[in-house]
Image (spheres, helix red, strand yellow):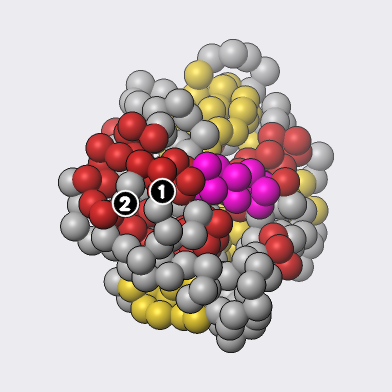
């Protein structure tokens, strides 16, 4: 958490609120939040006098393309990974400082972009204009296709899953298979495709993989439409919760009745992660 829909929700908000406003300075309150450059002073100096041209998303990473203020001259990229509890909030500079505020970037009009992160796993990067973002943000290098890209096809999934011996739930959490999917939407898509989370990847039939791909794309789109999921700390840039939690089929609903058949939702541990499923809709030998 946050996963693709939450990060996409943040990206949309940032593009609505922060573009073409000069970065006038800032403050790094927790130096280890800045992964590059190592020096907080260098990080802030590199950003000062730039403005954000556009925000993009790759998997769970946010990337802002920067230009020198008042020009089209490239000034590198600002990268952000929210990890478990990160929040990017658009606030008045005079807004009370949260206990877990880590980085502040002061933009025009007495507003600021504030990075708040309770667990301190989130990271920020400045990437120089003569470098590709993946040279500095190395986590970008191994990402698989985006779920909405043509490359994320049934043929691609079939080929990849035939090479794996582990359970399908664990495979969906591998960012090298598909970028941006995490625990919530893996559980939800497996429920919608009627596949038990412990089903071995190589045992899935083509019809099951077709259903899984369709379900994954559908549930991600549904969550984006309602602003993502807030189960603990996620907020959009204006401090508003996501609304998908109320629509979840299985995730976070242990012992609650299945919305489809009424059986009680069960939870098990797979690879150290909580996994939610309906024992009736997702039998251990899923229907083919």
Q: Is residue 223 magenta?
A: yes
Chief SS of the magenta region: helix
Image position, residue 168 (x, y; %): 33, 58
Give residue 146's quadrant in the image: top left
Residue 267 visible, this orientation: yes
Q: Is residue 258 above or below residue 229?
A: below
Image position, residue 83 (x, y; %): 47, 59
- Disc 1 is placed on an element classified as helix
Do the residues bearing badges 2 and 1 touch, measured as CB atoms within 8 Å? yes
- The residue nearer to you, when weighing 175 against 104, is 175
- Give the magenta range: 214-224
- Which residue is found at the position 56% from the left and 79% from the top? 265
The residue positioned farthest toward the top in the image shown = 72
Please name the residue that numbered disc 1 is placed on.
Answer: 208
- The residue nearer to you, when weighing 204 against 65, is 204
Q: Is residue 193 above or below residue 210?
A: below
- Which residue is found at the position 55% from the left and 27% from the top? 66
- 57 displayed left or right of 129: right
Q: Which mark is residue 204?
A: 2
């Amino acid at each position: 958490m946050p996963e693709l829909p939450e990060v996409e929700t943040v990206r949309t908000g940032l593009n609505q609120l922060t573009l073409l406003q000069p970065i006038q300075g800032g403050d790094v309150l927790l130096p280890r939040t800045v992964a590059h450059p190592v020096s907080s002073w260098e990080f802030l100096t590199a950003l000062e006098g730039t403005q954000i041209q556009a925000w993009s998303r790759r998997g769970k990473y946010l990337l802002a393309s920067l230009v020198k203020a008042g020009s089209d001259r490239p000034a590198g990229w600002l990268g952000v990974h929210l990890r478990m509890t990160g929040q990017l909030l658009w606030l008045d500079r005079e807004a009370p400082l949260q206990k877990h505020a880590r980085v502040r970037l002061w933009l025009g009009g007495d507003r600021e972009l504030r990075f708040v992160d309770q667990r301190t796993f989130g990271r920020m990067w400045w990437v120089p204009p003569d470098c590709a973002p993946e040279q500095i943000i190395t986590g970008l290098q191994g990402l698989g296709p985006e779920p909405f890209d043509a490359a994320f096809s049934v043929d691609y999934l079939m080929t990849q899953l035939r090479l794996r011996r582990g359970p399908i739930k664990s495979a969906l959490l591998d960012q090298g298979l598909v970028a941006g999917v995490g625990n919530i939407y893996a559980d939800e898509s497996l429920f919608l495709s009627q596949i038990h989370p412990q089903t071995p990847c190589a045992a899935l039939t083509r019809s099951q993989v077709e259903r899984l791909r369709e379900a994954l794309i559908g549930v991600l789109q549904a969550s984006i439409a309602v602003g993502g999921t807030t189960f603990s700390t996620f907020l959009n840039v204006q401090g508003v919760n996501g609304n998908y939690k109320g629509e979840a089929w299985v995730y976070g609903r242990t012992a609650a009745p299945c919305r489809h058949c009424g059986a009680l939702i069960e939870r098990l541990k797979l690879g150290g992660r909580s996994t939610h499923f309906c024992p009736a809709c997702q039998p251990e030998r899923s229907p083919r």
